Image (cartoon, rainbow, N blue to C red):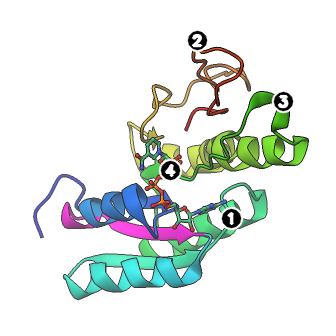
Amino acid sequence: MAGRFVGQAAIVTAGGSGIGAATARRLADEGAGVVVADLSGTRAEVVTASITASGGRAAAIKMDASDPQAVQRTLRVALDAFGRVDIMVNNAGLAEPALLDQISLESWNRVIAVTLTSVFLGMKFCLPLMRASVQRPRSLKPNSSNSSFPRSSCSPAGSGFTSRNRPASQTIDGPAP
Ligand SMILES: NC(=O)c1ccc[n+]([C@@H]2O[C@H](COP(=O)([O-])OP(=O)(O)OC[C@H]3O[C@@H](n4cnc5c(N)ncnc54)[C@H](O)[C@@H]3O)[C@@H](O)[C@H]2O)c1
């Protein structure tokens, strides 16, 4: 198989639908082995089946990208299936738009966990494996200005949010996906 990622392995969180599924399929088309990780095991299986039916390499796992143990289990699936991790697509995110004074703390914490903490966890646990696999690690957050190579230090809150200059009566998006 030809492609830019032949011999490499990728993990795509929230890979069972939408942008994540399209990303997983494209990476597989380009030769990568792909772990399709999604809160919905069924969706992950469907995308994995479509990749393998097209001649690609893929494995599915049901996981919550905000759960550190689930992220570590996902890494083990990648290592078992492909022996390495080169690309981490931290695609999982959540939006629960509401008026600012009506957002519950539970909703806020959930959105932060799935949208922001998941990226931290993905990068934190992947980085040692990436260093072992490739010279140029890639950690991606689609639809975000945050996509970058891992740095030696980072600020937990840095660039984690967008703000929109709208009147307080309008809805806000909360954490930037
Ligand atoms: N679609 C857009 O126009 C758009 C625009 C900007 C940003 N985004 C962001 O891109 C990401 C994907 O968007 P989409 O439209 O492709 O989503 P989607 O609704 O098509 O799919 C979301 C997937 O995420 C999975 N998921 C939800 N919570 C999860 C979790 N905790 N762990 C793992 N998987 C989880 C769901 O099961 C589902 O399969 C989201 O972060 C979204 O906020 C989307």
The numbered disc on residue 8 is: none
Disc 2 or 3, which lies upstream in sequence? 3
Find residue 9 and report its image quarter.
Answer: bottom left
Residue 165 numbered mark, or none? 2
What kind of residue is marked 2? Asn
Q: Amino acid at mark 3?
A: Asp
The residue tagged 1 is 64
Where is 21 relative to 41, above or below?
above
Query: Looking at the rendering, which quadrant does residue 65 occupy?
Result: bottom right
Give the magenta-colored segment's residue range: 28-38
Badge 2 or badge 1: first in the primary sequence: 1
Cβ of disc 4 within 8 Å of ligand 1? yes
Q: Earlier in the sequence, mark 3 or mark 1?
A: 1
Are the residues at dot 1 and dot 4 in contact (C-beta closer than 8 Å)? Answer: no
Q: Secondary structure at mark 1?
A: loop
Crowd class of label 3 (few under 14; some 14 to 19; many from 20; radius 10 Å): few
Crowd around label 2: few <14 · some 14–19 · many ≥20 (10 Å): few
Q: How far is the residue under mark 1 from the one under mark 4? A: 12 Å
Name the image quarter holding the C terminus. top right
- Camera-side residue: 63 or 83? 63
Q: Is label 1's Cβ within 8 Å of ligand 1?
A: yes
How many dots with numbers?
Answer: 4
Name the residue beneath numbered marker 4: 91
Distance CA(mark 3)–CA(mark 4): 28 Å
Q: CA distance from mark 2 to mark 3?
A: 16 Å
Q: Is residue 127 visible?
A: yes
Q: Amino acid at mark 1?
A: Asp
Looking at the rendered structure, the secondary structure element under dot 4 is loop
Q: Position of residue 109 (x, y in %)?
A: 82, 43
CB contact under 8 Å: marks 2 and 1:
no
Pick whichever of labels 3 and 4 is earlier in the sequence.
4
Q: Residue at coordinates 28% horizontally, 66% vertically from top-left?
A: 25
